[in-house]
Amino acid sequence: MVSTSVNEKDCIRILALMKKELCDNSSLGAVHVLENAWSQSDIRACARLCLSEIKERHPGKTVEVRIPYCGAIQCVQGSAHRRGTPPHVVEMSAVTFLALCLGELPWEQGIEEGVVMASGTKADISDFFPLFSSHVLEKAI
């Protein structure tokens, strides 16, 4: 559940509108469009929802996904991390995370451009993205 004044249904709708805006402005690049077209509070609320969705779909404590100023989760079945820095970490900005979740940024491109940092042998969570299908997002508008 999203821990801001924006509820889950509103976040799905915002994500759908973000996806539409990204499709309409594809030549500008997803991160640029998200940074300039949406408020930080909307970006953070949607990122928190996406983190919750990943945690629900991929329970476990093997990989830590960190989105600064939004949150961090542990996910993926396997050996549990207990103390200190986890061995498998993924970290990126909120707008990069949303671009991945919306299918507008391929995982490999994010790694190559250095906007997605992934360390550890189990940190490749590329199969998680896109997080929401076009059908789900279209229904939300």
Image (cartoon, grey):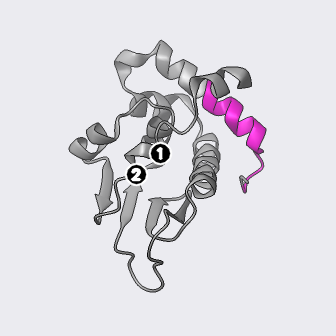
Residue 6 is a magenta residue: yes
Crowd class of label 1 (few under 14; some 14 to 19; many from 20; radius 10 Å): some
Magenta segment boundaries in residue numbering: 3-16
Which image quadrant: the C terminus? top right
Q: Which mark is residue 125?
A: 2
**Residue 72 x %, y %:** 53, 63
Disc 1 is placed on an element classified as: helix
Q: Is residue 85 above or below residue 23?
A: below
Q: Is residue 91 above or below residue 9?
A: below
**Residue 82 x %, y %:** 48, 84
Residue at numbered disc 1: 128
Residue type of the residue flagged with mark 2 = Ile
Residue 141 seen: no
Q: Quadrant of residue 127?
A: top left
Residue type of the residue flagged with mark 1 = Phe
Q: Residue at x 77, y 37 (%)?
A: 9
Q: Nearer the viewer, residue 25 or 50?
A: 50
**Residue 5 x %, y %:** 78, 49
Q: Is residue 59 above or below residue 128?
A: below
Q: What secondary structure predominates along the stretch shown in magenta?
A: helix
Q: Residue furthest left?
A: 112
Q: Quadrant of residue 79?
A: bottom left
Label pair 2/1, CB-CB below 8 angstroms: yes
Q: Is residue 89 left or right of residue 121?
A: right
Q: Residue at x 46, y 61 (%)?
A: 66
Which image quadrant: the N terminus? bottom right
Q: Is residue 18 above or below residue 69?
A: above
